Image (cartoon, rainbow, N blue to C red):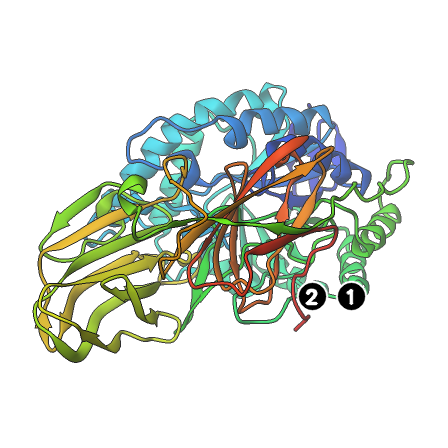
Amino acid sequence: MPELTITDEGFRLGDEPFRIISGSLHYFRMHPDQWADRLAKARLMGLNTVDVYVPWNLHQPRRGAALDLDGALDLPRFLDLAAAEGLHVLLRPGPYICAEWEAGGLPAWLLTEPGVRLRTGDPRYLEPVEQYFAQLLPELRPHLATRGGPVIAVQVENEYGASGLEDTAYLERLVTVLREGGVDVPLFTSDQAGDLAAGGLPGILRTVNFSRNAARNLETLREHQPTGPLMCGEFWSGWFDRWGGGHQGRPAAAVAECLDEILASGASVNIYMLHGGTNFGFTNGANDKGRYRPTVTSYDYDSPLDEAGDPTEKYRLLRETIARYAPVPAQPVPAPGAKLQLQDIPLLERASLLAQADVLGSPHRAPAPPTMEGLGQNFGFVLYETELPEAGAGTLRAARVHDRAQVFVDGQPVGTLERESQENALTLRSPAPGARLSILVENQGRVNYGPRLKDWKGLAGPVSFRGRDLAGWTATALPLDRLDALSYTDADTAPGPAFHRGTFEVDRAADTFLHLPGWGKGNAWINGFALGRYWSRGPQRSLYVPGPVLRAGSNEIVLLELHGTREPVVHLRRSPDLGTPE
C-alpha cells in the first residue's frame, strides 16, 4: 500500500492528496470469526481507513511473558484482513488506550510495584513499557505502509493532555521507542480541544476529539497547529453506558450533520465508534470522578454498526453524508444477519461457589487480606476466609473494598458492601467462636480514565470485627477462566452464589441475545465462551451471543448467579434489551 506523508497543505498518500475517512473498531471486542464481516462493512460505508487500539493487558497478562497473539488476539491476522479489504489502518498501541477498557489497557501486574507512577517516566513503569514494545513492534513492522502493509500512521500514547501529568519527557521517550523500534510512518496524538497544549509534541501531528461543534474545535486545533492537516481523531458517534444509568446515545441526524460539517471543512475524520462490540468476560472498565461507576458489558456505543454488526439508521445516514465528499461502493447497505430465538431454556443443575472454590483456585494463606494483584490475578473474584474469634453481634469493618463484597457467616449470606455506595461496614452475628467468615469480592472493572488508574482490587488494609483486626486469612483467587472442574447436581440447594447449568439444541448457529428476566447479578458463559456480566440494576438486560460461539446440536450455558433467581430459566431472543434511553 502507498505511504502517508504530511505536508503543510494536508495529507498525501503516495503522490495524491488524501483525506482520512476512518472508523474505530476493536478486534478484542469482536469474535475473530467476525472480523472480516465488520471490516467489509466499514469499506461499504465509504471508509478508507480503520482505527485500532491495542490492549497491553490482554496481550501480556503476566510480567515479562511472551505476547499472546493467538486466536482472538491475533493482531497481525486482523491487520492482514484490513489490507485484504483495501483499508488503511491507524494503529493506537498505547501503552494506555482508555477505550472504557479495563484499566485503560494497562496490565494489573504494574500495580504490584509500590508507588509506581503510571503514564510517566518512572522507571518502574517505563521499563515494562519498553519491554512490551520490544516484543510488539517486530510483530507490527511488516504491516507498516513503508513495508507494503496497511498501517499508515501510529498514535503516541492516548489523550495524554487529560492525564494532568504533564510529563513531556515521557511522551518524547515513547516517540524514541517507536522510532528506534522501526516505526517509520507518521506519528500523531489525539486530545480534546482543551487538552491540546498539554497532550501534544512539537513535530508530531495533533488531532482533536469531539462530538459536536466541529468548526469551533477544528479552529482550536488550528491555533495549536498552524499548518498541516486538520483531523478529528475521535468523532464520537454515541457514548457508553454504566450500571445503574440509562442507555446513552446520540441522534443519527445530529451525528450526520456534524460529520457533514467536518467533511465540508476539508478535515479528515475518525468515527469513534464505527462498531463498538462487547466487553466480553471481565474486561469492562470503570470511571471514578469521586464516585466509582463500572461500565456495562455491552459496548454498543450507539454506533453505526450495532453490537451484532448490523447496519443501523445511523450507518445509512453517515454513508449518505460521506458519499457527498468521497466515493462510496455501489453495493447496497448490507442486510441484518440471521438471528436465533429459543424460549424457556431451563438451568436445572447447580454448583455452589463457596463449596467448590477449591477446584476453581488455589488457597493462599496470609496474616492480612492480600489484594487481587498481590495474588497474581487480573480479573474475576477473590474469596477471603477466616474465623470469627467470638460469638455475638458486632460490626464487621473493612478498610477498603474494591469493588463489591458479599459477606457470609458459616455459608449464610449476611450482607453486601459496595464501593460504589462507599460502604465498608455491616452488622452481623457470629453464632460461636470459630464461625467461618467468608467474603467474596468482585473486581467490577478497573478505572480506565483520569487520575485514579492505580485501581487495585480485592480487600486492602485490615478487616475487623468488634474493633479487633482479624488474622489468619485464606485468600483464593477465582479468575473463572475455566469452569471444567465444577461438579453439578440438580439437588444442590446451598445458599449463596452458585453456578447454574443447562443445555439447549439448535439446528444452525446464528447471533442471538441472552435474556435473563428474574436473575440478579452474575456472569454468563456459552460453550465455555465468557459472554460477560449481567445485573438487574440495568440498563442492559441482555447479553450478545456471537453466532460463532454456538454450534449445531447441543450447547451448554452456565450462569454464575451471585444472589438468586425467581426461576432458573433463560431465553435466547433475536433483539437486545440495552435499556431505556437516557
Mark 2 secondary-structure assignment: loop
Amino acid type at circle 2 is: Arg
**Measured from the top left, where is residue 119 in percent x and y?**
35, 50
Please say if 569 is above or below 175.
below
Residue at image x 53%, y 69%? 537
Side of 250 relative to 369 (left or right): right
Lower sequence index among marks 2 and 1: 2
Nearer the observer, 384 or 88: 384
Residue mark closest to the camera, 2 vs 1:
1
Residue 9, visible in the rendered structure: no
Residue drawn at x 87%, y 46% is: 323
- Could you give the CA–CA distance between mark 2 and mark 1, rounded to whole angstroms? 8 Å
Position of 490 with respect to 471 (left or right) is right
The quadrant of the rendering that contains the N terminus is top right
Q: Are marks 2 and 1 in contact (CB under 8 Å)?
A: yes
Query: Label 1: few (<14), some or many (≥20) within 10 Å?
Result: some
Where does residue 52 sit, x and y in percent of width and height?
58, 40
Q: Position of residue 413 (x, y in %)?
A: 32, 67
Pick the front one: 255 or 151 = 255
Kindly identify the residue that appears in the image at 60 percent across and 67 percent down.
539
Label 1 sits on residue: 254
Local crowd size for mark 2, using a 10 Å CA cut-off: few (<14), some (14–19), many (≥20)? some
Helix, strand or loop at label 1? It is helix
Residue under numbered circle 2: 212
Answer above or below: position of 154 versus 284.
above
Left/right of residue 70 with respect to residue 217 in the rendered view: left
Q: Would residue 293 be seen by someone viewing this image from the given angle?
A: yes
Disc 1 residue type?
Ala
Identify the residue at image location x=34%, y=75%.
Answer: 422
| Quadrant hosting residue 90 | top right
Q: Is residue 481 above or below residue 423?
A: above
Coordinates of residue 421 in the picture (x, y in percent)? 38, 75
